[in-house]
Amino acid sequence: MFFTRRQVQDHFERNASRDLTAAMDDDGILNGQGREGLRDLHFGFASVGRAGCESIAVYNALQCLGLARPLPEVIRDMERGGYMRLWGHMGAVPWFQPLLRRYGAFSRAVRPRKLQRMAEKGTLPEGSVFLFSLWNDRLRFYRGLHTFAGVWAPDGRPGWVIFNRFNEDRIRRRYATLSDVLKNGRETGAWLVIYRVMKQE
């Protein structure tokens, strides 16, 4: 869904006027889209708190790659690029290749089983950055999807470090396996797509 230039600029200016530092970790990572300071940002005609997980996921992935961009800029470019689903009320389309290229990155889809095998065999490079999109409930698709960023073994210890896994999170979460990332105490989720995100050469 597309917005007029005036709408995009209005949303950008309102978002850019907000101070997001209280919601950031020391390294700039954002956790908890439902936290004060983030939840009321414009995301199309919705809000980041309700439907802005894709924008935070892209922001966090870029932050991990050393290609940091302000969150209001990421949201603006999603609005301009037609990524919004139902004007933002259903989040954004989880296909980010053109958007990532704009920022000097690119993505490659990877199958969950292959990714898990690479992690188990020790062939997955430490510090690899990913974007994960999953259905919240594989039996009830109307419950929507959630997208978040994560890194494999950022500190050299095997395991996944995940950002903004849940709306009210104030911490990054650590999981031993990809299955743990998906379930996290639930049995009903299902992967939609996983992308490895890398810098352009």
Image (tube, helix red, strand yellow):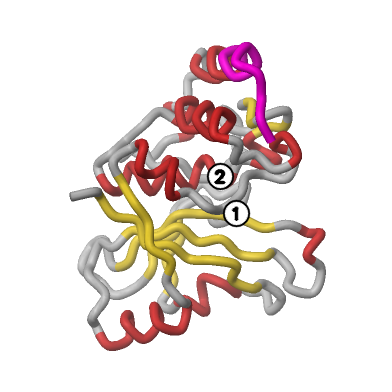
**Residue shown at the point (64%, 73%) measured from the top left:** 190
Find the magenta span and give its range. Answer: 1-10
Residue 166 got which mark? 1
Q: Nearer the viewer, residue 193 or 172?
A: 193
Give the mark count.
2
Q: From the top left corner, tell me how far across and down residue 145 is, in percent.
A: 67, 58
Does residue 136 sit above or below 172 in this rendering? below
Q: Earlier in the sequence, mark 2 or mark 1?
A: 2
| Left or right: where 2 falls relative to 71 | right
Question: Which quadrant of the structure image shows residue 7?
Answer: top right
Q: Amino acid at mark 2?
A: Gly
> Within 10 Å of the Cα at label 1, are there few (<14), some (14-19), or many (20+) other Cα atoms?
some
Q: From the top left corner, tell me how far across and down residue 103 is, in percent.
A: 33, 37
**Residue 3 colored in magenta in the image:** yes
Question: Which quadrant of the structure image shows residue 193?
Answer: bottom right
Residue 32 got which mark? 2
Q: From the top left corner, tell me how far across and down residue 156 is, in percent.
A: 20, 68
Q: Secondary structure at mark 2?
A: loop
